[in-house]
Amino acid sequence: MDIFEYAMQMEKDGEAYYRELADTANSKGLANILTFLADEEVKHYKIFKRMKEGKGEAPVSHLLDDVKNVFAELREKGETFHFDAKQPEHYRKAQEIEKRSEEFYREKAKEVGDPAQAEILNKIADEEKRHYNVLENIIDFVRQPERWLENAEWHHIGEE
């Protein structure tokens, strides 16, 4: 399997996992964030498909703004949240997927001979790292939702 086929499969698997998590989320806001992450994986899939065809373009994402808006909306609504104690495990698994993806894309960026492809791979790796950080914020939120929302400043979401 070539690099692009492998990357496309990784993105499809990530999308499926996020959609599964979104379907089982007991918070509409959390389901929205997970759907945003799934949609990001679809964008990456399409980028790799175009790269396989000899075309390429750097990713453009509004994920961080979307996530910050959802958390701000949750804070404004003042809802009470109750999450299953095992939920953080699911998000840790998603983080592992994002970490493996980031590492794979960085490794392949060093191996490809085309500087434009290397740049795209590194930019997608950067996005995967931001996804990892968004998931860290979700884990913190799920563990202590009211406290997290009360103290959140959201400027750090997705930052390196």
Image: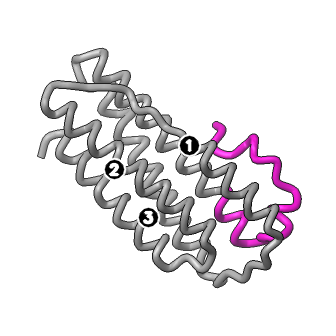
Mark 3 residue type: Tyr
Say if the magenta span includes residue 159.
yes
Q: Is residue 31 above or below residue 3?
A: below
Q: Are marks 1 and 3 in contact (CB under 8 Å)?
A: no
Q: Is residue 144 above or below residue 100?
A: below
Residue most extreme to the top? 115
Task: State the image quarter where residue 45 is shown.
Answer: top left
Residue 101, x across and y down, in percent: 39, 47
Kindly identify the residue that appears in the image at 24 percent across and 53 percent down. Answer: 9
What is the secondary structure assignment of the residue under circle 3? helix
The magenta segment is 137-160
Residue at image location 82% in from the left, 54% down from the top: 152
Q: Is residue 152 magenta?
A: yes
Q: Secondary structure at mark 1?
A: helix
- Residue 64 lies left or right of residue 10; in this view the side is right
The residue pinned by badge 2 equals: 42
Residue 76: x and y, percent? 81, 62
> Considering depth in this image, is 79 or 88 the residue closer to the camera?
79
Distance between the alpha carbons at the discs numbered 2 and 1: 16 Å
What residue is pinned by disc 3?
18
Instruction: Name the residue at 71% across, 57% down.
Output: 71
Amino acid carrying label 2: it is: Val
Residue neighbourhood size for the residue with mark 3, other residues' Cα within 10 Å, grouped as few (<14), some (14–19), many (≥20): many
Pick whichever of labels 1 and 3 is earlier in the sequence. 3
Amino acid residing under circle 1: Arg
- Mark 2 to mark 3 CA distance (whole Å): 11 Å
The residue labelled by disc 1 is: 130
**Dot placed on the residue nearer the N-terminal end, 2 or 1:** 2
